[in-house]
Image (cartoon, helix red, strand yellow):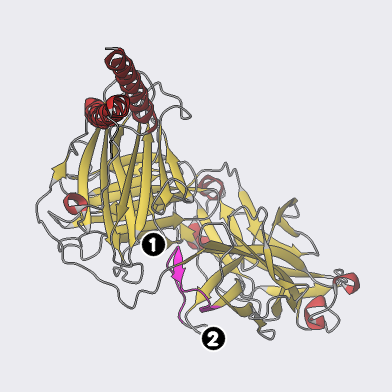
Amino acid sequence: MEVTRRLLIWAALVASCGAQLTSTVAEGRSTCTASLAGSNFGETHKAFILQLNADETCVWTIERPENQSIRIIFPHIQLDPDGRCENESIEVFDGRSTSGPLLGKVCGENDFVPVFESSNNSLTFQIVTDPASVQRSVFIFYYFFSPDNSIPDCGGYLDTLEGSFTSPNYPKPHPELAYCVWHIQVEKGYKIKLNFKDVLLEMDDHCRFDFIALYDGPSTTSGLLQQLCGRGQPTFESSSNSMTVVLSTDYANSYRGFSASYTSIYTEDVNTTSLSCASDKMRVIISKSYLQSLNYNENNLQLNDPACRPSVTNVIEFSIPLHECGTIKKIEDHSISYTNIIAFTESPMSAVITRQKHLQIVVTCEMEYNSTVEIMYITEDDIIQNQSVLGKYNTSMALYESSSFEDRIHDSPYYVDLNQTLYAQVTLHTSDPSLVVFLDTCRASPTSDFASPTYDLINSGCSQDETCQVYPLSGHYGRFQFNAFKFLRHLSSVYLKCKILICDTNDETSRCNQGCISRRKREISSYKWKTDSVIGPIRLRRDRRANGNSGLLPQTHTVETPSQPLSHLHLFSFMVLALNVIFVAAVTVRHFVNQRMNHRYQRLQVY
């Protein structure tokens, strides 16, 4: 009896410990934890809805054996509207667990459609909810893709004052599994008016399948203007001089897509005229009302070269190249100036008299050591008006396919192999042929803010990396090559930032002509300008020679809600374990008691 009583007490303790262990596991590993790599979720693409409970942590991993990347899209998110980001959020990680690099974090209040891309064939996302009792659901669409296989006419950069673009294949059905991004950037002082002349996409109340996302700014996190689908002819206006348009499609129900055009609207107050200077042009804005007050219109205006005509929107704009349209260049002391004249031609009313004022606008841009000073004055019957502001040179940096620097790479991010040779070029956008670009410093970083750690490829014009080769001076282009690398313990992304110097080729004593010198010998008084140019990210990829691209499976939407195991299953498992332990312990105790009894009553053998 004593043994039985102790056994029952011990069994109760085991059951109690099992219950505590079950509770701990339920808190640390959510009931919604599952894998999307099994037989039920092993497709190359999938759309599904997650129904979430309060106060839980959910973790999913997407993975396939193919060497492809994963794009995951959250077109519709319904979380706690009053929840704080630190208590309720979605986090996406690059790799097979939450210990991988964080790709991004999404909270209940979003002004963008979250889209993330992995660097390899696995991706993990975690959803944490707070204790509030509200309805929660997340629609998720993911697919595997190869960054090497791009869709023609899928996205691009538009930088003219007006233009048009369409979805790929328009008016034929748009491609499946497409993610296209158009960046519209016009001159400062303008805003963009975007008109969709035709939209025909799959209809859905929340635009979860095929949709267009419009952003009020230069990127897909600038602020969502609207997420639209179905059909219509909407019109939108930006609040600045940039706008971003995204087209995202899934694997079924393709329609003709969209056709859009845009114009520019000048937003700054211009009572008469204004001038701005860049390294490639002078920009003059003239108010229409000002011309009308003088009984002129845009047809009465001309530059030194009458063939150069203005563009007309709600204002009149002359975009004057520094080396064309009759622009006069003057070098004096340590500065360079460019001058042109806008003349007002009279309407021939009479060969003897006129009632119009004789008017000229003389515009001058002066480039100095560390600034660009704009000067404009207007002569109106001996009346002179002066203005001056600041500007800078325009530069950009890009990667190219080979050392010929002919085929520019437009992919962003650009996926490369470790130790692959990369060809980088910094370009000065100017029409002045006498200027030259010198690469002073080029630095790499795993982050776009260039915080520590960083790695110098070029310093003071000298190569600091054994694979880095700096090309000789080549006019408006600074060129170098190096082999791809990655930073240890960081995401496989690299950003490049180059500081360049701009000199006049006629100045033989300029810093540009001195080449590689030590920092303590540097003299910066002889070059005209310095500026920075940034590119990235460059992201490592795996060897894709054995890349497998499975065919698309269903041609109709299959939206699934994964089932979630209940917590009492964990309790049942531990109870079974506890009973097994009790059974083994009982057998052991019984065997032990029998042995003791046998020893106690064993008879002595008599020989």
For this view, does 542 lie left or right of residue 343?
Answer: left
Which residue is pictured at 33% across the width and 57% down the height? 70
Residue 19 location (% of width, % of height): 32, 22
Residue 414 is covered by the magenta coloring: yes
Q: Is residue 48 above or below residue 258?
A: above
Q: Residues in magenta? A: 407-422
Q: In what element is the residue under mark 2?
A: loop
Instruction: Give the quadrant of the N terminus.
Output: top left
Amino acid of disc 2: Ser
Q: In what element is the residue under mark 1?
A: loop
Tell me, yes or no, if residue 209 can be seen here. no
Furthest residue toward front: 607
Amino acid of disc 1: Asn
Q: How far apart are labels 1 and 2 at the CA level?
A: 28 Å
- What crowding class fits label 1: few (fewer than 14 Cα within 10 Å), some (14-19), or many (20 or more)? many
Q: Please give the label number shown on residue 298.
A: none
Residue 197 is covered by the magenta coloring: no
Quickly name the residue at label 2.
403
Q: Nearer the viewer, residue 218 or 17?
A: 17
Residue 469 location (% of width, % of height): 65, 83
